[in-house]
Amino acid sequence: MSDSMFINGDISNKASIKDIVGDVIKTYGKIDILVNNAHVSKQAPLVDTTDEMMALSFNTGFYSTYYFMQECYPHLKATRGKVINFASGAGLSGMVTQASYAAAKEAIRGLSRVAANEWGPDGINVNLISPIALTPGVEQWSKAFPEEYQGMIDKIPLNKMGDPEQDIGRVAVFLASSDSDYMTGQTLMVDGGSIMLR
């Protein structure tokens, strides 16, 4: 058995997700951890946001998360597994030009809290990470708009972008481990202190 596998599929399509989960079960026999981190969106002021922009964000972000959670539920119940969904400070703070992205991310938070309540008796933990990370996309943006990028860095109390592997990844590993067994329904802000939940 290989340690990893690549599956080509359309995560905005429910039937495709069913096939993806089926392929995972055929290969590994079980699902212990589900991580929903995919999302595509386009930035625009709210008044310029189109139905197509909103559909893109919800189909790739919210609906893919929703479909994967539904499809994986019986397998996660069997293993008393964990779900790690990704939120965003764009939704929590209401970041300008992020209407479609923020709306979908907050919908994911609501969905995750419902699942935490409903699936808790099944031994399934459902938590969220809200990160700020220097991804390849953010790195490209920083080079194109250096002043805006520095302005964002200046607003982060720890004064730096998070490393996707060392900073964000380690929190995901924690949520996937038994160390987080008594946590569910929580949004963990892995953003250098940018947003401090109360």
Image (cartoon, helix red, strand yellow):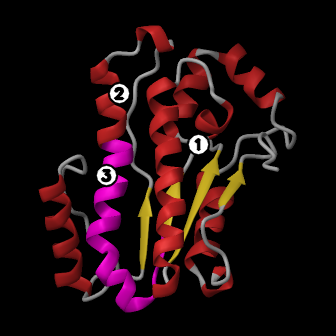
| Residue 52, x across and y down, in percent | 27, 22
* Among the two numbered marks 1 and 3 on one chain, the one whose residue lies closer to the N terminus: 3
Write the start and end of the magenta stretch as one range: 60-83
Whichever of labels 3 and 2 marks the residue nearer the N terminus, that label is 2
Dot 2 lies on which element?
Answer: helix
Which one is in front, 154 or 2? 154
Q: Main secondary structure of the magenta part?
A: helix
Q: Residue at x 46, y 56 (%)?
A: 111
- Residue name at image x 58 percent, y 59 percent: 128
Q: Residues within 10 Å of mark 2 (few under 14, many from 20)?
A: some
Q: Amino acid at mark 2?
A: Met
Q: CA distance from mark 3 to mark 2?
A: 14 Å
Residue found at x 81% / y 36%: 156
**Relative horizontal placement of residue 85, taking residue 14 as reference (left or right):** right
Q: In the picture, residue 183 is in which quadrant?
A: bottom right
Up-down relation of residue 143 to residue 79 (above or below): above
In terms of sequence position, does the residue under pointer 1 or pointer 2 come before the other?
2
The relative height of residue 21 versus residue 54 in the rendered view (above or below) is below
Q: Say which residue label 3 marks.
A: 64
**Residue 1 visible, this angle:** no
User: Dot 1 corresponds to which residue?
Assistant: 88
Q: Quadrant of residue 28?
A: bottom left
